[in-house]
Image (spheres, rainbow, N blue to C red):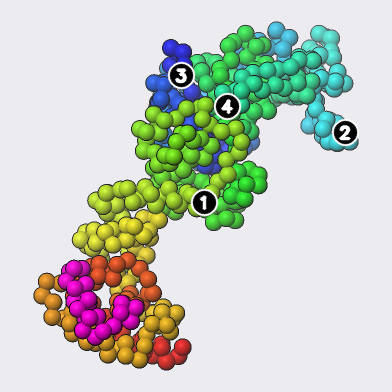
Amino acid sequence: MSDLKPRVRFAPSPTGPLHMGGVRTALYNYLFAKKHGGTFILRIEDTDQARYVEEAEEYIVSALKWCGIMPSEGPGIGGKHGPYRQSERKEMYAKYADQLIDSGNAYYAWDTSEELTTKRKSSEKGDWRYGIGTREEMNNSLNMTEEEMNAKFATDAPYVIRFKTPENETITFTDEIRDEVSFQSNLLDDKVIFKSDGMPTYHLANIVDDHLMEITHVIRGEEWLPSAPLHVLLYRAFGWDAPKFAHLPLILKPTGNGKLSKRDGAKFGFPVFPLEWYDKTESETYAGYKEDGYLPEAFINMLLMLGWNPGTEQEIFPHEEMIHAFSLDRVVKSGARFDPEKAKWFNENWLRAMDNETLCSLLKPLAEDLPQDISDDQLAGIVHLLKERVSFIHEFLDAEYLFNSPVSFDEKTVKKKWKEQSADLMTQLAADFGEITDFNAVTAKETFSAFMEAKEVGFGQIGPALRLLLSGLGGGPDLFEIMAFLGKEECLQRMKNNLESIATLKATL
Ligand code: GLU
């Protein structure tokens, strides 16, 4: 890095919620800035009025906040290069479009959308493009005299400004991730840079703002790579130094087959968005990582590893370590396949690494939504019991038997493990438990072991039966820890009251 502190931006268009790929772009920008003592900027690119979605900006800001990726310049935050919403910078762009007209790098075009559609349809392969080789047959200022042009302006017919792509050039630039990238200018369109509604298009606004905001590195998704040669040409036309470019690999579907899309979430059963999103036009709710019980630390850790690796075996990265370890040169070139199981793995790891007190505080609001009252002691007990067994916070509260005596019993276990003598053995065992004065996991276990010895039975003969009585299940956390959690009286009651239900069930199997 040179002495210049990097200034990077995340520049989403508020056309909908932020896809996890967008969050990863924001994360890499943020990490890059933090690592080099630079600035991370949020810029809202809302020049496309037709695709504008009102709630999207708020969603983007909330999502970044949840992830802990906080910009230091942006809408609502301020900064010396504001405003940071392009619609509020509207007046600035016209003069830059004019500048390109004056320097011969752009021209006016009056072609109607019907005319353009006819042209596109006329090409056999559907690859017609407005540009080199076709621009001379179109309705634009390149083919008009000054008078003709003025006459056109006088009609008030809507017009756009297009960039005039130079002929027969190879446009080459160095991408921080892909090294040298080249494009043939003759294959590019003359893109619209200024629209008839008085708004710049993405291309013009993006370049002007990156320049005015003194952006040093453009770090964005691979889908923008085809736009990069036009951007390079625009910088040149303005006589400005271009920032460095880094195009991040795509995030692929779990099958490895194509780009991860918003529909894949429902299809493969995982969220694609950081926060839940209700799509008004589709009347559909899309799941969010937050609502599905992911910790933000786990979510961004997963995103960090989706397209980057540290070159070591380390996979779990707390915030500061992420900043320290990140570098653009370890971002991979090829698409990164998303693995929902791995996402879950990150969450489990982060949950297990958390101290019990923090887990309790995260669990408490969820517990408050339940019909029964759960005390702080009970919450602490649940966390202790289940910490190694859950993948998500809400799963702590899924073990219904911790609060209520079971009403159903696992058929498979009843069939295999509940024997003729089970009821007798359990009644005798309950009597032994009843004798314990200091009832806890250790004393319950001791009593249980002594009982096995005295009756000459193995764990397999009485353990599953006891678990059935207490929880209705065939498996779960340590039996004696469960007993300690429930307390002596509750255990004894369940051991007595559930005998009949199990016997009745057994008779039907
Ligand atoms: N507004 C573009 C987007 O929605 C920004 C692309 C870029 O970073 O240049 O992703």
Q: Is residue 131 visible?
A: yes
- Range shown magenta: 440-463
Side of 350 relative to 196 (left or right): left
- Determine which residue is flagged by label 3: 6
Q: Amino acid at mark 1?
A: Pro
Provide the secondary structure element on which disc 2 rests.
loop
Position of residue 284 relative to residue 210, above or below, is below
Question: Given this view, does label 4 or label 3 mark the residue nearer the observer?
Answer: 4
- Determine which residue is flagged by label 2: 123
Q: Which quadrant of the structure image shows residue 159?
A: top right
Q: Between marks 4 and 3, how big is the CA–CA gap?
A: 17 Å
Expressed as whole percent of the image width and height from the top left, the position of residue 387 reads 32, 57
- Determine which residue is flagged by label 4: 177
Provide the secondary structure element on which disc 4 rests.
loop
Position of residue 84 relative to residue 356, above or below, is above
Q: Residues within 10 Å of mark 2 (few under 14, many from 20)?
A: few
Q: Which quadrant of the structure image shows residue 53?
A: top right
Side of 112 relative to 395 (left or right): right
Q: Residues within 10 Å of mark 1 (few under 14, many from 20)?
A: some
Q: Residues within 10 Å of mark 3 (few under 14, many from 20)?
A: many
Provide the secondary structure element on which disc 1 rests.
helix
Observer-nearest of 465 and 495: 465
Expressed as whole percent of the image width and height from the top left, the position of residue 90 reads 57, 22
Question: Given this view, does label 2 or label 1 mark the residue nearer the observer?
Answer: 1
- Determine which residue is flagged by label 1: 340
Q: Between marks 3 and 1, how big is the CA–CA gap?
A: 33 Å
Q: Amino acid at mark 2?
A: Ser
Which circle's residue, 3 or 1, is located before the other in the chain?
3
Q: Amino acid at mark 4?
A: Ile
Which circle's residue, 2 or 3, is located before the other in the chain?
3
